[in-house]
């Protein structure tokens, strides 16, 4: 009996020792997270200075590193120049391909295009450099530009290219773009930014339409691709643009080898940075960010960069004829005034985001800074209650729809809490990305939509994503959220038209939208990027993706 | 025996047809639009509608279903991925070695560790060894695979630095995923072996063998174990199928580009051909494994072999009488 008991005791002791070992591991990782909010915020200014959209001067100032490993959350799947968009593909796109132009801090610069001009409302002439060649040495001429655009259009993967009527090579280095309508503000630039350019020779030589063997004109050539695991791109040392003053953010090549490591589980991004397997990642879970920040347990050798996202969390009311909001302006205002945008910024983003004062955020070049001091449904519970009392609301539960992501869910929960504060009941309906994209046009599916949207150029183009009825009329009868309002349409078109675009038309649209309260911006979230100290300056593209080639590196 | 195998193989056709119809129907009615996924968030409804037409997604259910069935069963083509523009079959075959490696190693671990654990527990029923084995088995069935995986990563990759935390490469990359994935299987195997062995070692012929003075080792391995094997083989077969199809979590945690990750990513993107092809492929593989299990039954237990052959003979007799 004693013998049996001692065996049992020994087994228990062994299992306890194993448990302690595991508990020790867990505790080591979780404790510092409690101090997360302050630490992230304290470090913010220095990191802000070290991050931003690719900037030629700062990025070129560092040394050229041998290799950098970037953690990405999804496999690129297909690296062909004109395949469908995906999260993994976006991450490697600018390393592999170049476009006619690029955009830095809202301004367009030529990459392959030397210059361009509008010859009539529907026609543009573009001149390309006469010494371009791809990463395999094939010369690139106007015919290749035509081939690239025609191939991209044929895939029907790029809605923005549907405005193109024809692309013609007028000589070896001049291309004429004819459009089927007079282009609106930013539209030409967006067309030029939409199509990756390759040489016809390289494309035809590829056995798989460049799905695994992409050859662009960038400084990097993909050397190996293990689907679902990694992509390795190497600097060919033979980049076509030899004039460094003309090399812009997306084309900078400060590192000899870039390895994109596919890590689908976000907590493994933490481990990868911790063990040095990865040098930079934007996939670290928010709860782990503080561990890499000053004072955090993995801060040695690492840093956290915080930058504002170009996307805005906004609220859109369902304005269909079956919606409670259609004839109830007071209810719309009541909900708007009940939201503490700063509170959401603090609660959801540790204060690293920014409360917004328009349907879009302040990062656009045409944003009117005077709006910052205006009353934009500023948090006022009493006012909200007054509007609610005047409204036709009679206690029904409103359905708040959002697309599932950790942050969207927190923002949605906070909206729900703020609305319950004034006595409005709401239920949350979270969908995955695909379902959400479909359900946002289902007039019977929701009452309020929390949407994350943004553009990379002008504020009017973010507005367009919801308020341009021409894009949605067939499906919704009005704007994306079913608004049928002729004046809104007129103002939107005036703000988008090249002839009338300007401060006045922008102001008029902003004011009208604030007055009608069909929807409003709430908060602009941050993007957290954790990187090793090997990287002195993090560069991002217009979509806020890491540009490893344009980062600057310590010697 | 061969006729039995051929008959079973023929039975796989309606099974696979059923799987194809069910998975196609589920994907057809599943909300979400692959055209919208390809075009991205800023696509207008008009652009999405045009893309849907180009992809043939606007056609009626029956037309698409019949097209799919004829493509798969008449042309043996699982289709082309919407996103990768690559044949689904080649995508699966590229990823199969990763999944198969994990599944086979896990299976070996399950057999090599689970079976001895179960035998030990049965032989020492109610003793300390039995309790320890059953505590391990209980832990195995209770601990979620993803949690164990993360604990193993923290210990062996982060703390000790002995093994890589994720990715693919040499065999060292498979150690942690296989341990995490096999633990539950080892536990089930141990529990099943224990229960089968307990049933057998109480049998009269084992008592007789003991009375004859045979060595305990011979009694266990020559008389008891072969007779306890049938349920154990069933668990192994089911386990193999489960491991082939169920490596999704482990592949995601360890970023292993196997079939599980391929299919999960396709579900998120609504890449219908990949999802349907993946499910159909795993269905066929599972059917083959079950057939293999039945064949092994016949070799392990002559009574079952006789039964299979008896069925053939009675069938032949009926044909002759007719």
Image (tube, rainbow, N blue to C red):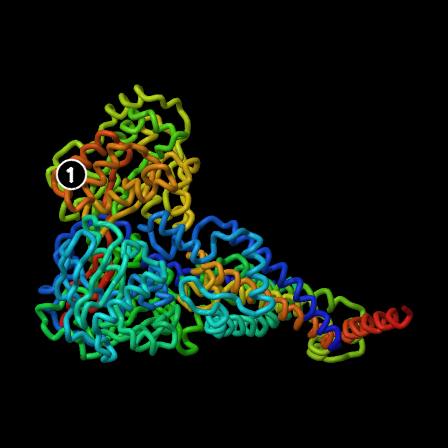
Residue at 35% x, 21% y: name it: A392
Q: In this view, does B271 lie to the left or right of B157?
A: right
Q: What element carries label 1?
A: helix
- Indicate the quadrant containing the C terminus of chain A: top left, top right, bottom left or bottom right: bottom left
Residue A70 falls in image quadrant: bottom left
Q: Is residue A478 left or right of residue B114?
A: left
Q: Which of B11 and A438 is in front in this view?
A: A438
Q: Is residue A190 above or below residue A491?
A: below
Q: Mark 1 points at which residue?
A: A505
Q: How crowded is mark 1: few (under 14 residues within 10 Å), some or many (20 or more)?
A: some
Q: Where does the image place residue A151, in percent across and percent down from the top left? A: 32, 65
Report in which chain the residue with disc 1 lies.
Answer: A
Residue B153 falls in image quadrant: bottom left
Q: Where does the image place residue A461, in percent across and percent down from the top left? A: 23, 47
Residue at 61% x, 65% y: name it: B238
Residue at 47% x, 69% y: name it: B87
- Residue A18 showing in the rendered view: no
Q: Which of A358 and B184 is in front in this view?
A: A358
- Residue B286 showing in the rendered view: yes
Q: Where does the image place residue A260, in percent across and percent down from the top left? A: 30, 69
- Indicate the quadrant containing the N terminus of chain A: top left, top right, bottom left or bottom right: bottom right
Q: From this viewpoint, which residue is outermost toward the top? A: A390
Q: Where does the image place residue B161, in percent across and percent down from the top left? A: 34, 72
């Amino acid at each position: 009996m004693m013998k049996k008991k001692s065996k049992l005791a020994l087994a228990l002791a062994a299992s306890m020792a194993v448990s302690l070992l595991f508990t020790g591991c867990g505790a080591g990782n979780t404790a510092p997270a409690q101090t997360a909010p302050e630490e992230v915020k304290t470090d913010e200014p220095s990191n802000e200075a070290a991050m931003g959209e690719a900037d030629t001067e700062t990025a070129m100032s560092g040394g050229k590193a041998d290799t950098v490993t970037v953690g990405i959350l999804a496999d690129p799947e297909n690296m062909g120049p004109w395949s469908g968009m995906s999260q993994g593909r976006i991450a490697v796109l600018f390393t592999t391909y170049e476009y006619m132009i690029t955009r830095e801090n809202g301004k367009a610069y030529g990459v392959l295009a030397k210059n361009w001009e509008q010859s009539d409302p529907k026609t543009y002439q573009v001149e390309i450099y006469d010494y371009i060649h791809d990463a395999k040495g094939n010369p690139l001429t106007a015919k290749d530009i035509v081939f690239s655009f025609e191939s991209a259009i044929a895939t029907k993967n790029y809605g923005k290219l549907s405005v193109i009527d024809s692309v013609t090579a007028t000589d070896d280095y001049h291309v004429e773009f004819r459009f089927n309508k007079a282009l609106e503000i930013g539209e030409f630039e967006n067309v030029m930014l939409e199509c990756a350019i390759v040489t016809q020779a390289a494309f035809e030589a590829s056995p798989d339409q460049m799905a695994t063997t992409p050859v662009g004109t960038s400084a990097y050539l993909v050397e190996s691709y293990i689907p679902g695991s990694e992509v390795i791109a190497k600097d060919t040392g033979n980049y076509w643009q030899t004039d460094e003053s003309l090399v812009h953010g997306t084309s900078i090549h400060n590192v000899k080898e870039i390895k994109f490591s596919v890590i689908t589980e976000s907590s493994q991004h933490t481990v990868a940075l911790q063990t040095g397997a990865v040098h930079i990642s934007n996939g670290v879970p928010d709860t782990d960010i503080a561990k890499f920040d000053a004072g955090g347990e993995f801060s040695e050798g690492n840093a956290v960069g915080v930058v504002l996202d170009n996307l805005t969390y906004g609220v859109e009311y369902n304005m269909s004829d079956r919606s409670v909001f259609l004839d109830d302006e007071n209810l719309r205002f009541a909900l708007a005034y009940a939201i503490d945008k700063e509170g959401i910024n603090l609660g959801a983003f540790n204060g690293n985001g920014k409360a917004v004062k328009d349907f879009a955020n302040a990062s656009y070049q045409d944003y009117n800074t005077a709006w910052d001091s205006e009353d934009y449904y500023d948090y006022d519970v009493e006012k909200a209650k007054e509007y609610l009392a005047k409204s036709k609301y009679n206690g029904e539960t409103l359905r708040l729809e959002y697309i599932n992501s950790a942050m969207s869910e927190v923002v949605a929960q906070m909206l729900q809490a703020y609305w319950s504060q004034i006595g409005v009941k709401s239920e949350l309906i979270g969908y995955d990305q695909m379902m959400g994209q479909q359900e946002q046009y289902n007039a019977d599916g929701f009452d309020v939509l929390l949407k994350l949207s943004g553009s990379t150029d002008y504020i009017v183009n973010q507005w367009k994503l919801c308020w341009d009825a021409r894009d949605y009329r067939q499906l919704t009868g009005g704007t994306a959220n079913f608004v049928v309002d002729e004046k809104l349409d007129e103002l939107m078109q005036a703000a988008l038209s090249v002839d009338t675009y300007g401060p006045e038309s922008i102001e008029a649209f902003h004011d009208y939208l604030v007055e009608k309260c069909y929807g409003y911006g709430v908060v602009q979230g941050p993007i957290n990027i954790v990187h090793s100290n090997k990287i002195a300056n993090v560069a991002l593209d217009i979509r806020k993706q890491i540009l490893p080639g344009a980062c600057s590196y310590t010697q | 025996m061969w006729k039995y195998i051929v008959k079973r193989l023929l039975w796989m056709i309606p099974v696979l047809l059923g799987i194809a119809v069910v998975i196609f129907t589920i994907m057809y009615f599943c909300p979400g639009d692959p055209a919208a996924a390809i075009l991205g968030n800023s696509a207008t409804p008009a652009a999405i509608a045009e893309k849907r037409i180009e992809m043939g997604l606007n056609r009626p259910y029956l037309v698409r279903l019949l097209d799919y069935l004829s493509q798969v069963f008449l042309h043996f083509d699982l289709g082309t991925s919407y996103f990768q523009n690559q044949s689904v079959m080649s995508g699966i075959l590229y990823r199969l070695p990763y999944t198969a490696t994990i599944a086979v190693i896990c299976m070996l671990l399950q057999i090599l560790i689970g079976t001895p654990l179960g035998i030990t527990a049965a032989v020492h029923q109610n003793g300390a060894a039995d309790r320890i084995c059953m505590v391990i088995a209980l832990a195995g069935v209770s601990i979620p695979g993803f949690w164990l995986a993360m604990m193993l990563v923290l210990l062996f990759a982060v703390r000790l630095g002995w093994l890589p935390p994720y990715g693919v490469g040499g065999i060292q990359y498979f150690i942690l995923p296989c341990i995490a994935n096999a633990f539950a299987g080892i536990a089930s195997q141990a529990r099943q072996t224990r229960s089968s062995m307990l049933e057998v070692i109480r049998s009269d012929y084992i008592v007789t063998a003991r009375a004859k003075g045979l060595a305990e080792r011979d009694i266990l391995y020559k008389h008891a174990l072969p007779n306890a094997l049938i349920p154990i083989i069933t668990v192994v077969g089911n386990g193999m199928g489960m491991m082939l199809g169920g490596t999704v979590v482990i592949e995601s945690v360890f970023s292993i580009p196997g079939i599980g990750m391929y299919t999960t990513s396709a579900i998120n993107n609504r890449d219908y051909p990949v999802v349907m092809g993946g499910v159909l492929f795993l269905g066929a593989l599972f059917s083959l494994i079950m057939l293999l299990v039945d064949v092994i039954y016949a070799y392990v237990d002559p009574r079952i072999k006789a039964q299979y052959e008896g069925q053939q003979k009675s069938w032949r007799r009926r044909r002759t009488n007719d």
